[in-house]
Amino acid sequence: MNFADFLSRLSEDYPVPDSYIAENTEIFHVQELSGPRPEPKAPVQNVLYFADTDTCDEAAFSGLSENGLNLVWTGGRKPSVCQNAFVNWAQIETGEPGPILQCIRDILVESCQAQALYISLLQALLSGQNISNVLSDIAEKAESTLVIIDMSGKLLANSVPVRLQNSLWLESVEQGFCPPDFIEHIRDIRRSSGFSNQQGPQIHRCEDEALYYLLSRIIVDNTLFGYVFMIQESPNFAPQYRKFLPLIGRIVADSALRSQDSLTLRSRLQDNTLTDILDGIPAEQAGARIHTSGIHFPDHMCVMVVRPLYYHGKTYLKSTLLPMLTRIFPTSLYVLYHHNAVVVLPQDTALTLTEELSRFQESCGRERLLAGISNPFTNPARLREYYLQAAKACSLSQQMDVKGYIHYYKDLAFYDMMERLSREQRLPQFCHPALAVLREYDQQKGTRLYDTLRAYTMCGFNQNIASEQLFLHRNTMNYRRQKIEDLTGLNFENPDTRFLLQYSFLIDHYLEHSLV
């Protein structure tokens, strides 16, 4: 503990009206000055000298050379040695010297205990031990529960067992996150009054969950990264744990910075939040995590899933695909998930041929990429639902042999519906009977009336376009249409008939490409 920290801690118990710091040296021991010291002697390094000037005269200081002296005193007289510019000194408001000296000793013991905890935490991490094991040891001695969370409310570590009767907490910890109500409680307090580590962790109460907690912030590179909590049903916390919590936060921050810079850590917070939502955490928890983490989503958005047509490994996704997407869509949200790049795009960017989408289309052709885009939505807590749409657009475009690199779920939703129907439902029975009539006739006569009707239907019942697509003369097309009407009794002017034929050929198309 350095001299400045010592004074800050001492001032919590005794007023320090005046002080001076020449060099902020470390202090490990305290020694009381009393009586004369006739032999000149240098002060011992890292020792704090204490004197009561009402009972101790100047002779007590005469034997000390001044350089490197750390001195605190109580009483009505300022020692003359304090006039030296190289002396650290502080005046304690007049009081009983015995209790003051004992307080100083207790402060230094607390500091040694805190340093020992820091070293044990550091050794545990360097040896590969899980920090949760260390938290469990501390929590067992405190008969409490320790939890470390990031800014989104995701649990980074916790003590085991969880000594709480609150069923919501038990369930949430098992799933790896804080209860949404508690996250909102922390957010409300931070917004209204803020948390500070300067005075050490303070006792707070969460009324909704009838819990008391000590809290210490985790600061990484001047950025709020998360919190360390000691949580219990009782407001009685042992004093030493107010010192331990900041040390736990410090070791977490130091460990994080050793492996990643602050920009990477902020990115990891975003990645963790998006990944957990894509994994399917409850909507209430997703909403609370998004709210607390400060991740900004567009008001109207789509999910785009991008994957290589030929998998090149995670290195390609991180070093090539993600940087390319960042250049094309610089303001969008990204995360790598299940061998895909998942991008949250503004609806206008996703659904219109913007310059960005045009550039991306060119990159897809060059890099041999496949992309699926979901329907638009507004609630980011439903991100997983629309991710599944985009991923399904990718897989169905390949299954149905759809040309192009960018595919919209809305164009393939009918096939998704077909895929969801059970095998027992026998999809062919939902097709218009005219299709079976024409197939049988073609097989018997060697004609192509089925293909003619399909082209005519998929061309929007435009006879000219259909004849061009089939490379047929107009008269031939007229003949085939008349033959189809004679065999099936179809009335192409009836809107209901047209609709039945359209969905029937979509079912048929799906069955032709189905893996089932």
Image (cartoon, rainbow, N blue to C red):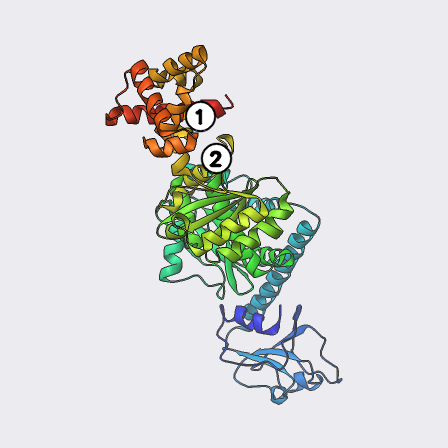
Dot 1 or dot 2: first in sequence order is 2
Q: Secondary structure at mark 1?
A: helix
Alpha carbon separation for disc pair 1 and 2: 11 Å
Q: Position of residue 238 (x, y in %)?
A: 51, 53
Residue in the foreground of this view, choosing between 238 and 242: 242
Asked if residue 258 can be seen in this view, the reply is: yes
Residue drawn at the location 25% of the way across and 21% of the way down = 491
The location of residue 358, given as percent across then percent down, is 46, 52
Q: Who's the residue at 35% across and 18% down the image?
A: 430
Which is more toward the observer, 84 or 230? 230
Quarter of the picture holding the N terminus: bottom right
Res. 402 mark:
2
Where 144 sits versus 199, above or below?
A: above
Q: Circle 1 sits on which residue? A: 510
* Type of amino acid under label 2: Val
| Residue 479 placement, left or right of 255 | left
Q: Residue at x 34, y 15 (%)?
A: 433
Q: Secondary structure at mark 2?
A: loop
Question: Residue placed farthest to the left in the image?
Answer: 494
Q: Is residue 205 visible?
A: no
Reply above or below: 41 against 320: below
Q: Position of residue 218 (x, y in %)?
A: 53, 58
Q: Are marks 1 and 2 in contact (CB under 8 Å)?
A: no
